[in-house]
Image: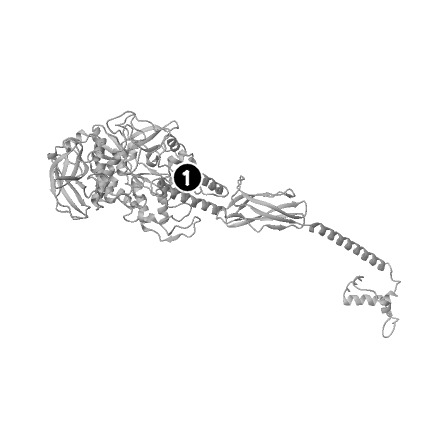
Amino acid sequence: MPRQCRSPGRRCPARPGHGAGIRLLALAAAVAAAVLAAAPAAASGGKPGQPGVAAPLSIAITSVSPSYATPKGTVRVSGTVTNATAAAATGLEVQLWSSSSRLASRDAMDAYLTAPGASDVDTPTKAMQTLAPVPAHTAQPWSLTLRVSQVGMSVFGVYPLAAQLSQFGAPVDAARTFLPFWPAKSGSHATAPLTLAWVWPLIDVPHQTACPALLDDSLAASLASGGRLNRLLAVGDSALGRRAELTWAIDPALLDSAQVMTARYRVGGTATCSGASPRPASRAAQAWLAGVQSATAREDFFVTPYADVDVAALAHHGLNAELTDAFADGRAVAGAKGMLGQAQRTTAYPGDGRGETGPIAWPPGGIADYGVLESLAAPPNQVETVILSSTMMPPARPVSFTPSAVTTTPNGLGSQLHVLLADNGIAQILSDPPGSIPGTGAGGSSAPGAAFAREQWFLAETAMIAAEAPRTPRTVVVTPPRRWAPGTAVATALLNETVSTPWLRPASLASLVTAAHQTGQVPRKDPQQLQVSRNELRASLLRQVQRTSARIGLLTSILVHPQPRYLSTAMAAVESSAWSGIPGGRRKARQLLRGINAYVAAQQRQVAIVDPLRVTLGGKSGEVPVSISNHLQSAIQVRLRVSRPSTVSIGHFTSLVTVAGGTQRTIKIPVRASAAGSTTLTLWLTTPDGQPLPASTARLTVEATHFGTMAIVIIGIALAVFVLTAAARAIRRGSRRAGGPGGESGEGEAAEAGPTGPDPAYDGAEADTVGRERAGPSPAAKEPDEHASTPGWAERR
């Protein structure tokens, strides 16, 4: 019978050797019927039991207790009957159907669920109940007890179980499920336990890009009590979760965003990081982070690349640098103080000879071809273990059982890569139905019937795998959706089945990879050379990512001390695999990319040549000052370039300039013009290696004048006049000194003057000397200045 992936409404790669359609219809039938029965629906003319149609009268099974049958035991089967009509329904009867013959295979299980009416694999039992009238638009419970001995189950395996609704003896609707049978002590000796390992994901949609503020406040609800991430942590870190030996898969971007919320944080805002709304510190975020740290201190875990980027899409489009950055950022965040302390923990059990698994990768959807695997294994990523879907490496030849999940494949580097093949059938059982929105806490239907359908089908699927080859120990890997949103009851029930079911034995991923003895393996086909999932990020988006990465590289190249992998976490948010899994996700990715481009452009505008730029020279040459401003917080190093016309020459200047953060620096450029007049120079900034910076071009107008030549002429004339004047004064002073004591002097007249006339006893020389000694030295006689005074009329005579 053909098999198909089990996600309702989705087409997935079919298992080799099988057709498509049965598995999809089976899941749709089981879940849709349960939802219809749990909540009244509009009346419809559809056939009873037809999947996806709201029947006027419908039945659902909501519980089976215990979940598997044992010899001489009883099983309590409960459910609801829903009347979606406008009148009360009477004459209703519920009867259980089962069989003494087990279902033969997993394909037979699929076919049983999709049978369009009474099935030829089951028969009515004696368990029957007549219902009281069911009022219009209401649901009424029912409950029946099935005696296992009356059915005749005797061999370990999965048996059909159905509840048929009849009205006045005519079949109206049927609800189907499975009932595993375990033959108690005899079965435990004849059946080797199936080793089952869970990957427990703590992964969300990205909540940050280039700005410190969160994109929105949806994470607060998910981390709060009852939220999606809160439920996953609470169930996984419970005593039950620890017994299940979960291996946690954690997105470091989620840890980063939760860490932001532990203090006052901001939400929203523009692409330039303004206008965000403040929020108080979140106690829920603090408690959740503490819980994650506590869980990972005791249990195995690994971290995804930052923001759980679509590793396959990046590898297919040659974005290996972005892939490497995402791995490096993820490990850096996980190893940061206050986070997990390391990027991975895969402990060994004492005495089982296990070693380390090496770094683990889990490509989105478990889909990867050889090119992707080689990119993951290559340094510096150095992944040694990869989790793939079982559809990636099917058995090389048809087999009648489900082989062990552990295998190897060449990594393209001359070595082997450990491969854990997650069971595709179980993964589809756990998938969210159409309409659920991962990351918002609204995952799947909360109807009791839908939850039970998943739990019982999961249990029956494991029982069928174990019963296919009961004497051969094998391993199974279970990977729920990456952004899984189960209710607490569903998650708890699934883990309880894992630890309490007699044919299952829980284990961690590391124990599967490093087990000393592997059993249940078969030769498998190698991964395809090229396989592109329809859910990969689109090539058009990744081309835009490449252009934005180039702009970021340009900005990074001018920073003196750039942060490691500058803005790489913001780009990882755009490259996240989340956008392929939610409605409108690709549009959201493009919106985030536009925001990053706006942020980068705003950062580049913080570095500019200062205006106004007009300089007048004191002649035909001089130094022109040019100022470069840096409004970034970090120091930059840029190169100033000048373009000139042929009439201007530029002298040597230091073009490579370092400008501290929040400052500006002025450079003087020697300029010489061949003629007076205005000349325009073009200035622009480049990176140190010469790449032009966007929007950095400026115009500088230089005005050359004749003022320099005229100034030299005027100074020359003034100097000549000064020399001639000084020479003339020197000649005149020399002429007066040449006249001597024979000339007319006032000194002779002063000697003869006196009130009593001359005194014969007077010695003029002595008196003059004595007078000078008493009065002190007389000041030197002031040299007459012919320019300061004009000789009088008597002197001219």
Q: Mark 1 falls on what kind of element?
A: helix
Looking at the rendered image, the quarter that the C terminus falls into is bottom right
Report whether 763 appears left or right of 52.
Answer: right
Amino acid at the residue labelled 1: Leu
Report whether 762 appears left or right of 649.
Answer: right
Please tell me in which quadrant of the rendered image residue 385 appears. Answer: top left
In the picture of the structure, the residue carrying the numbered disc 1 is: 541
User: In this picture, is 664 found above or below 191?
Assistant: below
Identify which residue, 282 or 96, lies in the foreground: 96
Looking at the rendered image, the quarter that the N terminus falls into is top left
Report whether 398 appears left or right of 214.
Answer: left
User: In x, y percent, where is residue 767?
Assistant: 83, 68
User: In x, y percent, where is residue 460?
Assistant: 21, 35
Q: Is residue 660 visible?
A: no
Identify which residue, 564 or 782, lies in the foreground: 564
Report whether 320 appears left or right of 764.
Answer: left
User: In x, y percent, where is residue 28?
Assistant: 25, 38
